[in-house]
Image (cartoon, rainbow, N blue to C red):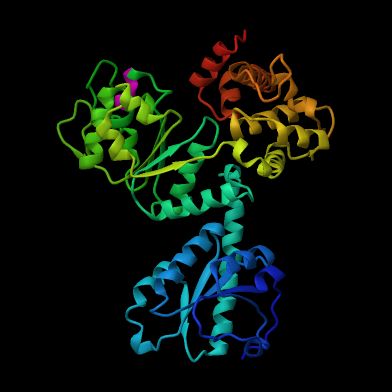
Amino acid sequence: MSNRKRNLTHKERNILVLNLTDEVCLTDKQTDTLQWHFNHAGTLSAAYKALENAPCQIAIAIIDIPHQQVVQRAIELLSARQPGLLWLAISLDSPQNMGNLCFCFTDYFLDFHHLPLDWQRLDHTLGHLCGMAQLNEQWSKEQTTHQPRSFFFGESSVMQTLRDNLYKIAKSDETVLIGGETGTGKGLCANLIHSLSSRKNGPFITVNCGALPPTLIHSELFGHEKGAFTGADRQYIGRIERANKGTLFLDEIGDLSLELQINLLQFLEEHYIERIGGQKSTEVDCRIIFATHVNLENAVEEGKFREDLFYRINIIQIELPSLREHKQDIPLLAQDYLSKLAPPNRQFQFHQDALHAMTNYQWPGNVRELKNRIQRAIIMTESDIITEADLGIKFACSANDDPDVVDLAQHRTEIDTELLLAAIKRNNHNISAAARELNISRTTFYRLIKKCKITL
């Protein structure tokens, strides 16, 4: 057995042992000489609690044929709670009887051992997994700078359930329909599903059906050939075709015209597209995620959305919670945004009255509004302490002083106006640069300028 010294943190030493069987194969006496701390869990709830009390990066599942399905299900749920968990299997069945288990090993486990245990080999395997966990953690930190996932932070049961569901949805390849109020993070949710799916190495293509002019959206989706219409001076590969081997995210699908709904339904059924002006069909292999803030069932009844398309895309539906439904997560979300939005040379913190105001505010604009208000506060504050006044929450309330009654259109315009003016000023009235800073297109930037009645 190895006695070599390891420079490991407490988190790296902890190993979760999920044992839903009656067999005891890892005891403290046997593992005393190993430099690992084993946390045993005989139920799923005990495993959840173990992860909360003793954070870890590696888990061992005790598995046999009778308990195979329940163990696999528990692994899925635990991995949804902590996606970076690395799993090792210990099989209770003899090598001669493992044929019925082998098919699941590559889906769930990075390695497996069987009884009787070779403790030196187990120690060696855990060391390798620890190294992989460190690499994964470093990669995740790097990815976070490019793909923040603040919308899905939170310790509330609502957010835990959402994360569990997203993990299960990501493992399938079916179409997904995401509902929820504006600002709840439907686009980020779609991106997260893609990043957790088997298509994660493929492209993630986004189309906002409500932002594109009706005259252009057909060409944007399906593409066109050179000379197909006036101005088509070259071949254009559409968004659907660009999503081949990846994921296509169609946001605000309820704004799509009935004519294009027919074309989209045909693609969903046949997986072929034909560019405008083209003479041949092109096969496209992509998963499609739809999102809408409107009730599509009502749109079907009103004749604004095709019933056959609705039933075709409504295979897996998920509703994102409003921020009002998990207010206990607001301090965590706010702190995360504050650290990410602050300039590198400054450190901010929230005054207690700001935290109180954010927790009691109704957030009609949801998490997007929370982010915008914190961005506003960083611009407006004259110190390193963010106050309620810096957030401008009171200013957004209606004249009757009831904080629960908000003029939604008015306060959104006020926030947009402040952000636009600040971006224009910081970029010396260079509209292209200001639009890039806010991560929106020039067209959207000019539309917001018009809406907010800003004079350049």
Q: Where is residue 72 in the image (x, y as percent from the top left)?
A: 43, 68
- The number of discs equals 0
* Residue drawn at the location 61% of the way across and 43% of the way down: 150
Foreground residue among 434 and 336: 336
Magenta segment main secondary structure: helix
Viewer can see residue 351: no
Residue 420 occupies quadrant? top right
* Residue drawn at the location 57% of the way across and 77% of the way down: 126
Query: Does residue 263 appear left or right of residue 85 in this picture?
Result: left
Q: Where is residue 334 in the image (x, y as percent from the top left)?
A: 70, 39
Residue 150 higher or lower than 49, as above or below: above
Residue 404 occupies quadrant? top right
Which quadrant: the N terminus? bottom right
Which quadrant: the C terminus? top right
Query: Does residue 168 appear left or right of residue 121 in this picture?
Result: left
Residue 184 higher or lower than 45, as above or below: above
Q: Where is residue 280 in the image (x, y as percent from the top left)?
A: 15, 35
* Residue drawn at the location 63% of the way across and 30% of the way down: 363
Residue 370 higher or lower than 142, as above or below: above
Residue 58 higher or lower than 358, as above or below: below
Foreground residue among 353 and 383: 353
Query: Does residue 101 appear left or right of residue 333 in this picture?
Result: left
* Residue drawn at the location 50% of the way across and 61% of the way down: 77
Foreground residue among 86 and 347: 86
Farthest residue to the left: give it. 279
Viewer can see residue 291: yes
Foreground residue among 121 and 39: 39
Q: Where is residue 312 in the image (x, y as percent from the top left)?
A: 28, 39
Q: What stretch is highlighted in magenta?
A: 215-219
Query: Is residue 56 a member of the stretch shown in magenta?
Result: no
